[in-house]
Image (tube, rainbow, N blue to C red):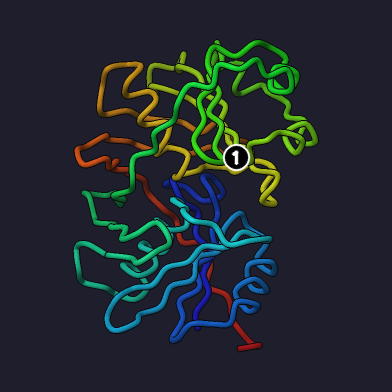
């Protein structure tokens, strides 16, 4: 077992979204996965191992396993390419969300993920209005996800979240987004997931599966740049392609390899 920390969706240390990556020789027990993720206490810990030549990849928050995680997948690919000297140009991971591919793309890594589609939710939502302190332009949902567009990217940046309100809501994962006033980006967002032990996720690849589709339709363009305006901040380049897929591109910085004395 080797255990690393990686800052994803950034080219400089201490920005983007930190993930732990645990490279295993064999699978662990369910309790061991949960214990390690809780010990790392990052938004996600990725666990990867080979089974019959195929990489198996799982993601855990400090409280539970999740179905899809972008930044920890990017971090895992970075570790395999640079610390394990994998020579393939494309990595394939078997996950709870199917086969996910990550390839080298110039000086970035490119993930091929399922496109996230949402539907308009037109019911009046007093709780969300109280959370935002304004009436949203639109609310779209898909499963546990709730995507909320508001008027100003400044309001996205300045929002002071009341997580107790979100814990009362019927949805569990919240994206607040707006068209960017900064011409370097197409849209800005923030992501809140308090029900999964993550009050605010710094940079969220899985959320951009939904954001890419939403803003692609709204702005009538397939190539977009999103900025997640958390305290750490992070940049994700998105490209909506055919077959209900989206390409998410970003960089990573390997921060540390931990010395394990308890294995």
- Relative placement, left or right, of 130 versus 222 is right
Residue 237's x, y, as percent? 34, 36
Q: Residue at x 64, y 71 (%)?
A: 34
- Relative placement, left or right, of 247 versus 152 is left
Question: Is the residue marked by circle 1 packed among few (<14), some (14-19), or many (20+) residues within 10 Å?
Answer: many
Residue 161's x, y, as percent? 73, 29
Residue 224's x, y, as percent? 32, 28
**Above or below for 136 versus 164:** above
Q: Which residue is mark 1?
A: 173
Front-most of 72 and 183?
72
Front-most of 59 and 5?
59
What secondary structure is found at the residue carrying circle 1?
strand
Residue 41's x, y, as percent? 68, 61
Residue found at the far front of this picture: 123
Hey, which quadrant is residue 54 in on the image?
bottom left
**Above or below for 23 versus 17:** below
């Amino acid at each position: 077992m080797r255990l690393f920390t990686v800052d994803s969706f950034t080219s400089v240390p201490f920005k983007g979204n930190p993930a732990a990556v645990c490279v295993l020789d064999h699978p662990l027990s369910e309790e061991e996965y949960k214990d390690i993720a809780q010990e790392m206490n990052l938004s996600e810990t990725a666990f990867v191992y080979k089974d019959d030549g195929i990489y198996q990849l799982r993601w855990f928050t400090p409280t539970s396993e999740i179905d899809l995680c972008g930044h920890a997948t990017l971090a895992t690919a970075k570790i395999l390419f640079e610390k394990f000297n994998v020579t393939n140009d494309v990595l394939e991971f078997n996950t709870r969300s199917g086969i996910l591919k990550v390839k080298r793309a110039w000086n970035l890594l490119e993930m091929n993920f399922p496109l996230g589609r949402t539907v308009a939710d037109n019911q009046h939502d007093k709780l969300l209005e109280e959370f935002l302190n304004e009436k949203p332009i639109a609310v779209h949902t898909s499963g546990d996800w709730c995507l909320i567009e508001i008027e100003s990217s400044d309001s996205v940046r300045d929002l002071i979240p009341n997580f107790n309100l979100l814990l009362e809501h019927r949805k569990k994962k919240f994206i607040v987004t707006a068209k960017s006033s900064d011409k370097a980006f197409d849209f800005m967002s923030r992501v809140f997931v308090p029900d999964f032990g993550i009050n605010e996720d710094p940079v969220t690849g899985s959320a951009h599966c939904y954001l890419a589709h939403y803003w692609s339709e709204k702005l009538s363009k397939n190539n977009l740049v999103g900025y997640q305006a958390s305290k750490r901040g992070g940049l994700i380049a998105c490209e909506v392609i055919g077959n209900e897929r989206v390409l998410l591109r970003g960089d990573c910085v390997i921060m540390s390899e931990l010395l394990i004395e308890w294995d």
